[in-house]
Amino acid sequence: MMDADTPDTPAAPSEPQSRNVIYCGVCTLPPEYCEFGGTVKKCQDWLQNENPTMYERLWSADALEASTATLSVDARKRAEKDAHKKALKAEAQEAKAAATIANSMVTIKRVERNKRKFVTAVSGLEAFGLENKKMAKEFGKKFATGASVTKVPSGGEEIVVQGDVSDEIEEFLLEKYKVIPEDNIELVEDKKKKKDTGAGG
């Protein structure tokens, strides 16, 4: 039993206290580790907008000078050179990714299987970071039909959706996946060639 005259002493928290960790909106690492990702410049811009105090602590001229103050002159020069190389490499990767997306096409092909029976083949989604298997499942659910991923002779993959749903797929992609520009979707019709049955003369 406790004595009523004992002075109040602050009790230790009964549960462990959580720590509030901030994660970068660009590379998803804590800002202290952004330099190890490939998007340092974007990460810095994001942090400067979202948390100026933390940006000053990590990336201000004083903070950078303090972190390299213990290094020798040669080591400091090497660190600056490495940082510059990393930044250039990250910029080049971003430019390459943007160029790949700009030059990539999603092809939605309406294929005639036999009289009045069609399938819709979709290819090129992986260039926009979309997984074919997941997309096939999504198309199947959305259009209440069969959809599967098949290999194509050229070596890639395409999604084959049962039925003529080419216009609907285009609409669905533009509505739900803003990463695909409208100009990067092409609709193609692949009609079955009719075989000559008449005798040649």
Image: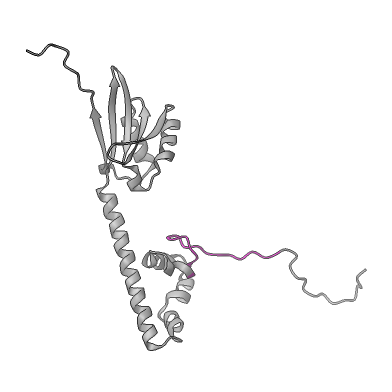
- Indicate the position of residue 15 as horizontal and vertical percent values: 72, 63
How would you classify the magenta stretch by its main secondary structure?
A: loop
Residue 14, given in percent of the width and then of the height, sits at: 75, 65
Please identify the quadrant where the N terminus is shown: bottom right
Q: Is residue 7 left or right of residue 73?
A: right
99, above or below 189, in the image = below
The quadrant of the picture occupied by the C terminus is: top left
**What residue lies at 46% left-to-right and 63% top-to-bottom?**
24
Identify the image quadrant of residue 121: top left
Q: At 58% from the left edge and 65% from the top edge, which residue is drawn?
A: 20
Task: Give percent across and percent down for residue 151.
Answer: 34, 37
The reply to whether the magenta stretch includes residue 27 is yes
Find the magenta span and give its range.
16-32
Residue 98's x, y, as percent? 29, 55
Above or below, 132 relative to 17: above
Residue 136 vertical placement versus 191 (above, below) = below
Q: Residue at x 50, y 62 (%)?
A: 23
